């Protein structure tokens, strides 16, 4: 029974193991299926997540009253003067009358609060200031500086006037501001520069208010308008050859013209449709607040600074606009540092119909009577007899004088832009502006180690994803690189250099810096000895253009063959490219006859031929030509080769007897052989120059050192080190002199043995010698002054005696010279007398002071304290 029981248990255990294996197999298969599904789900999840783009919003730039430190501001920022309070009362009264007469108009921007929470009239916030930089004297550079220097802060509400208008000094300090802050600062600088400028409060489009330039073309991409050159009309000659008769079919010409006109009309229609489609895409979306967005800008009136016509300046961009521009939709008021005007004209058509005659009280209502603008008389008196008596007339004059109220001076402190701020320009030294299919980046000078100051990136699409061209501008580079233009489509790079480069390089166009590849170099030919203007190089040719050479060479073209082995920089000298053909062209030499003046010279090196073509005479229509077949002086057997007529083939327009001689042809061929050697050497020098230029350019790009003016003490390290070394040296010299002056016993202590202790007798002797020496020096100085005094006196007496002897025969000039000498001599004598008297007064005091110092000297005090 036990054996049977064991067998049953074994069978049950085996069945359980089989079931467990099957369960494990099913679980593994299920896991594999689930893992496959999980992997597919994971890939799908990753793909979906990759399609999700997260844009981190930029933190809005804020500039509020709480962000300004008012502890160091002047008292004029915190309080109002009596005249300013009176002006605010006048403005409030003016606003009440304006609201009563024009209830449908928006409130005026009259006296907002400043950073100290004090109400200030807008005209007194303008502080006319002329900047000490010549670059800020013109309106365009001044507006560009303000737009680059400040960061835009949007208005708290796009349809409400701001409650605060900060001072230009705070705006400059924190480099932030809204459109009103921009305009106030710019207007202050323009009025200081002499312009008739005004701040404008009005309404503008959304693109202007938000500085959205994504639908405008970058100014750097706009090409200047080319004025077509007027062609001179040819004067018809009396005897002219008639044109041949046109034998073509007029019907066929008419049909062809119709077909071309239809094709052209279809192309123009297609082009117009595409242009309209692009314009429709470029149109901004509809703005629900169109015409309600408040904005401030600057108005420049004609007259001053030779301004021919009125125009606007947008402070955010620094660009100018016509007063009829559609971006500006209306004006409420304008003001400068002297007065305030309210626009009374209808702006239903924007600013296109506005007339800026501020002296017309019908179109512009002014706040104060005191204004430079001429205005119409408010009191039209038909008859002066209506005035009853003189007393009424005087009272009326007094009332008019009381009503005449001048604008108080500005409460703003002096506007100062330091040299560092002027050079930095942009906030943190960098600014990015997005245009239509372009992005402009600006940097302050010396901010980038390679001298980069601006970069313009041009894109193919509006989304700015694919770059097609990059332009970079540089400043203060030692290699004088001014601009680099990179074409991303063709991979061509063009570099522009300023004059002064030691290689005289002006323009360098290349794909890579590997030698013997496609490139073009242009040079400042006036700075070169050989007059090279341009050099174009490919793997198989090199072309050079010259100007102003003594040999009249203007063109050289070289064709190369294939090297026997692979080229490397190390083997460039030992294994040059084989020259197959050298073509040279020359300009006309007026000192030679046309038949002797070579116009083109071709050295066919591979075929050992030389071809010449001469200049064309004015009375001929063909030119002379020659071709030489080069041969060695001796053949393979060592026999001397004699010149034969077959070695020179020529065509002469006007044959000469001399040119037919073999000797003349032989000498010419020998000269041409020498010229060929010289041309080959010059070509080799050009190849070496190209290698040197490429090497120098690689080194310059690796180092890109910047030049620093010797007057720039902050950046010029050498000048700074030299100045500090000179200051240390001067300070050390001053300390040595002070120590030498203080150590009055040094000359006497040197006489004693070093290291020996003083005795009482030696101390007394040192004191006496020091006092006696000082006394003698005082006496010598007095004697010296006395000697100079006596010498001047004797010379004056001699001059006076000479004058007494020659007084009768002296001229007017001699007498004037004598009087001048006497005046100068008396002046010197008085000075010497005063110095002597002062020395006599101070000498005893100096002697007693030295004696007291000796008694208190730590080296003598223990020996001389008995005598104190």
Image (cartoon, rainbow, N blue to C red):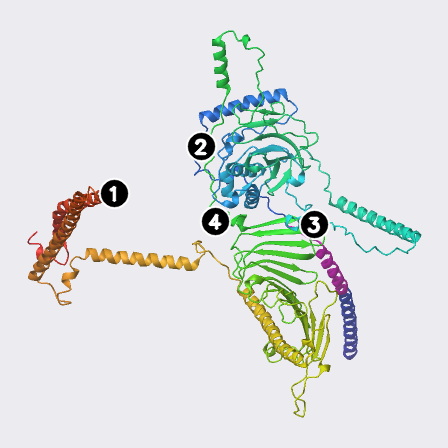
| Magenta-colored segment: predominant secondary structure | helix
At horizontal 70% and vertical 31% (from top left) the residue drawn is: 349
Q: Secondary structure at mark 4?
A: helix
State the CA–CA distance, disc 4 to disc 3: 46 Å
Q: Earlier in the sequence, mark 1 or mark 3?
A: 3
At horizontal 10% and vertical 58% (from top left) the residue drawn is: 769
Nearest the eye: 200 or 524: 524
**Vertical placement of 799 versus 301: above or below?**
below
Q: Which residue is mark 3?
A: 229
**Vertical placement of 330 versus 500: above or below?**
above
State the CA–CA distance, disc 4 to disc 1: 63 Å
State the CA–CA distance, disc 2 to disc 4: 27 Å
Q: Nearer the viewer, mark 4 or mark 1?
A: 1
> Marks 2 and 4: CB-CB under 8 Å?
no
State the CA–CA distance, disc 1 to disc 3: 73 Å
Q: Position of residue 846 (x, y in %)?
A: 14, 49
Which disc is residue 215 wearing? none
Q: Nearer the viewer, mark 2 or mark 3?
A: 3
State the CA–CA distance, disc 2 to disc 3: 61 Å
Q: Which residue is mark 2?
A: 76
Q: Earlier in the sequence, mark 2 or mark 4?
A: 2
Magenta residues, start to end = 34-55
Nearest the eye: 764 or 651: 651
**Vertical placement of 357 versus 659: above or below?**
above
Q: Which residue is mark 4?
A: 420
Q: Which residue is mark 1?
A: 811
Nearest the eye: 700 or 807: 807
> Marks 1 and 3: CB-CB under 8 Å?
no
Label 3 Cα crowd, 10 Å radius (few <14 / some 14-19 / many 20+): few
State the CA–CA distance, disc 1 to disc 2: 68 Å
Q: Earlier in the sequence, mark 4 or mark 3?
A: 3
Q: Is residue 859 visible?
A: yes
């Amino acid at each position: 029974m036990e054996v049977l029981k064991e067998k049953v248990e074994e069978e049950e255990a085996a069945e359980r193991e089989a079931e467990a294996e099957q369960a494990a197999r099913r679980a593994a298969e299920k896991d594999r299926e689930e893992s496959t599904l999980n992997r597919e789900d994971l890939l799908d999840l990753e793909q979906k997540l990759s399609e999700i783009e997260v844009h981190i919003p930029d933190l809005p730039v804020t500039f509020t009253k709480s962000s300004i430190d008012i502890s160091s501001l002047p008292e004029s920022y915190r309080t109002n003067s009596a005249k300013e309070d009176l002006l605010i009362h006048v403005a409030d009264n003016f606003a009440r009358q304006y609201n009563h007469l024009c209830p449908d108009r928006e409130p005026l921007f009259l006296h907002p609060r400043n950073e100290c929470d004090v109400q200030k009239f807008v005209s007194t916030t303008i502080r006319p200031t002329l900047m000490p930089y010549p670059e800020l004297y013109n309106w365009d550079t001044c507006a560009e500086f303000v737009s680059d220097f400040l960061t835009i802060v949007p208005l708290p509400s796009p349809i409400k006037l701001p409650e605060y208008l900060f001072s230009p000094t705070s705006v400059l300090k924190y480099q932030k501001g809204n459109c009103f802050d921009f305009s106030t600062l710019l207007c202050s600088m323009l009025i200081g520069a002499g312009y008739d400028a005004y701040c404008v409060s009005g309404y503008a489009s959304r693109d202007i208010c938000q500085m959205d330039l994504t639908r405008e073309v970058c100014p750097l991409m706009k090409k200047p308008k080319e004025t077509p050159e007027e062609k001179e009309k040819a004067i018809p000659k009396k005897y002219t050859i008639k044109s041949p008769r046109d034998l073509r079919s007029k019907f066929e010409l008419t049909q062809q013209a119709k077909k071309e006109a239809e094709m052209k009309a279809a192309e123009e229609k297609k082009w117009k449709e595409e242009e309209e489609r692009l314009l429709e895409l470029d149109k901004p979306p509809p703005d629900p607040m169109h015409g309600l967005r408040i904005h401030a800008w600057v108005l420049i009136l004609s007259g001053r600074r030779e301004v021919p016509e009125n125009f606007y300046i947008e402070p955010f961009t620094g660009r100018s606009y016509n007063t009829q521009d559609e971006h500006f939709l209306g004006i409420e008021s304008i003001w400068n540092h002297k007065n305030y005007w309210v626009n009374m004209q209808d702006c239903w058509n924007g600013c296109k119909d506005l007339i800026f005659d501020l002296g017309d009280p019908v179109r512009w209502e002014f706040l104060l009577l005191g204004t430079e603008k001429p205005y119409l008389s408010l009191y039209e008196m038909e008859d002066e007899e209506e005035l009853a008596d003189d007393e009424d007339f005087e009272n009326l004059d007094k009332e008019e004088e009381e009503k005449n109220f001048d604008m108080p001076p500005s409460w703003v402190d002096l506007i100062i832009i330091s040299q560092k701020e002027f050079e930095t320009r942009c906030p943190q030294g960098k600014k990015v502006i997005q245009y239509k299919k372009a992005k402009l980046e600006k940097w302050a000078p010396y901010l980038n180690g390679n001298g980069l100051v601006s970069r313009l990136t041009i894109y193919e699409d509006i989304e700015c994803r694919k770059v097609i061209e990059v332009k970079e501008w540089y400043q203060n580079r030692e290699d004088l690189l001014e601009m680099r233009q990179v074409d991303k489509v063709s991979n061509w790079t063009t570099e522009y250099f300023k004059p002064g480069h030691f290689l005289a390089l002006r323009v360098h166009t290349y794909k890579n810096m590997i030698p013997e590849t496609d490139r073009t170099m242009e040079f400042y030919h006036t700075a070169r000895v050989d007059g090279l203007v341009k050099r174009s190089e490919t793997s198989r040719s090199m072309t050079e253009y010259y100007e102003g050479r003594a040999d009249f060479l203007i063109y050289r073209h070289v064709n190369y063959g294939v090297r026997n082995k692979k080229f490397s920089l190390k083997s460039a000298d030992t294994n040059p490219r084989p020259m197959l053909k050298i073509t040279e062209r020359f300009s006309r030499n007026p000192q030679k006859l046309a038949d002797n003046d070579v116009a083109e010279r071709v050295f066919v090196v591979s075929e050992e031929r030389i071809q010449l073509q001469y200049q064309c005479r004015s009375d001929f229509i063909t030119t002379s030509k020659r071709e030489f077949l080069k041969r060695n002086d001796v053949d393979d057997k060592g026999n001397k080769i004699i010149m034969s007529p077959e070695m020179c083939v020529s065509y002469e327009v006007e044959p000469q007897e001399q040119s037919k001689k073999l000797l003349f042809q032989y000498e010419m061929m020998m000269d041409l052989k020498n010229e060929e050697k010289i041309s080959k050497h010059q070509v080799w020098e050009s190849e070496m120059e190209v290698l040197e230029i490429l090497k120098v350019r690689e080194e310059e790009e690796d180092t890109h050192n910047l030049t620093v003016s010797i007057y720039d003490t902050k950046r010029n390290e050498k000048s700074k080190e030299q100045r500090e070394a000179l200051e240390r040296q001067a300070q050390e010299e001053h300390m040595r002199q002070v120590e030498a002056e203080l150590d009055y016993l040094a000359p006497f202590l040197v006489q004693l043995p070093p290291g020996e202790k003083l005795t009482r007798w030696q101390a007394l002797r040192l004191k006496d010698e020091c006092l006696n020496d000082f006394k003698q020096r005082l006496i010598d100085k007095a004697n010296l002054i006395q000697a100079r005094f006596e010498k001047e006196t004797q010379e004056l007496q001699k001059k006076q005696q000479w004058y007494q002897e020659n007084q009768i025969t002296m001229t007017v000039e001699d007498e004037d010279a004598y009087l001048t000498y006497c005046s100068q001599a008396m002046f010197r004598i008085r000075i010497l007398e005063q110095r002597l008297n002062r020395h006599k007064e101070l000498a005893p005091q100096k002697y007693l002071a030295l004696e007291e110092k000796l008694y208190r000297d730590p080296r003598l005090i223990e020996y001389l304290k008995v005598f104190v």
